[in-house]
Image (cartoon, rainbow, N blue to C red):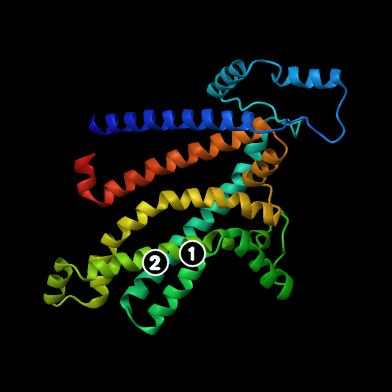
Amino acid sequence: MRWLGLFATRLAGGLLTLWLLVTLCFALLHAAPGGPFDTEKAAPPAVQAQLAARYRLDQPLSRQYLAYLGDLARGDLGPSFQYPDFTVNALIAASLPVSAGLGGAALLLALLLGVPIGVFAAAHEGGRLDRLLMALTATLSALPKFVLAPILILLFAVTLKWLPAGGWVAGDWRYRVLPIVALMLPNLAWCARLTRAGVCEALGSEWVRAARGRGIGRARLLLVHALPAALLPVTAWLSPALIAVITGSAVVEHVFGIPGMGRYFVQGALNRDYTLVMGVVVIAGALVIVANTLVDGLRAWLDPRLRTSA
């Protein structure tokens, strides 16, 4: 029953956060100058009136807001202004698997590579390899994705000609490599640095020194005694890492021309496609809330003290 109450509290908090996000995004979009049908060649007034009526833009803002919330409660994200033959649900249903596949693969690879690198650096603390790895990870963590992505294109597509510079062909893994690497590298750097710091701190603790005094080998000390404690800050980092992957995917998908949610978000923002932007924000916000809940559950499972305080 305690876990049920905790789940209900998390669910209520998540729904409140999502409502605040929708309200803020709705207000900002309609406060921005320009409109979805403002083009260089203005349409006749009768056509503009028909378009406004079709998309409820002729109604007061409060009625538009309440109507959007009603549609959202039914799972309807509305029609797209930019793609009149498609609903926002259809566009997101087609683009979400692409974005989720790239982001999920990038985050998984960052964990699978970052944790061993962090443990290796901690095992050689203060040595040349440790300093080299920390210098590389510091550089990668400071590089923004809009800089890293063109560098990867210049190196692996233009100079070496190993991989395509952009575009998307379903089922062809070569088009996925550079976008995944661009999303992965900064996260890998942070994961490695957090793991190294956690393992170094754990190795200096009294209980690890006591275990060393009992004659336990260095490998067992690292993997069995120090690493589990070092994974707690890594699990806490997963939430901001997921947010970074979602927000960074908009840049990476735009640079590589990938038909994912990020590219639709950028195009929707440029063309004042209110419903498309709102739809992407709602889905991304819901994903972040779900991921935060899962990460909190994982941390509570790793650390009994968190279960007690929950």
| In the displayed structure image, the side of residue 137 where residue 159 appears, left or right | right
The image quadrant of residue 35 is top right
Q: Is residue 292 above or below residue 88?
A: below
The image quadrant of residue 154 is bottom right
Q: Position of residue 229 (x, y in %)?
A: 26, 60
For label 2, the crowd category at 10 Å Cα-Cα, with few meaning under 14, some 14 to 19 and many 20 or more, is many
Q: Residue furthest bottom?
A: 128
| In the displayed structure image, the side of residue 31 where residue 292 appears, left or right | left
Q: Quadrant of the N terminus?
A: top left
Q: Quadrant of the C terminus?
A: top left
* Residue 171 makes an appearance in the image: no
| In the displayed structure image, the side of residue 3 where residue 20 appears, left or right | right
Q: Residue at x 66, y 64 (%)?
A: 150
Q: Is residue 73 above or below residue 293?
A: above
Q: Position of residue 29 (x, y in %)?
A: 62, 32
Q: Residue at x 12, y 71 (%)?
A: 210
Q: Secondary structure at mark 2?
A: helix
- Amino acid type indicated by mark 1: Ser
Residue marked by disc 2: 193
Picture disc at residue 59: none
Q: Secondary structure at mark 1?
A: helix
The answer to the question of whether label 2 and label 1 lie on touching residues, with beta carbons closer than 8 A, is yes
Q: Residue at x 64, y 41 (%)?
A: 265
Residue marked by disc 1: 141
The image quadrant of residue 30 is top right
Q: Position of residue 246 (x, y in %)?
A: 54, 48
* Residue 277 makes an appearance in the image: yes
For label 1, the crowd category at 10 Å Cα-Cα, with few meaning under 14, some 14 to 19 and many 20 or more, is some
Looking at the image, tell me whether mark 2 or mark 1 is earlier in sequence order: 1
Q: Residue at x 35, y 65 (%)?
A: 195
Q: Nearer the viewer, residue 143 or 87?
A: 143
- Amino acid type indicated by mark 2: Arg
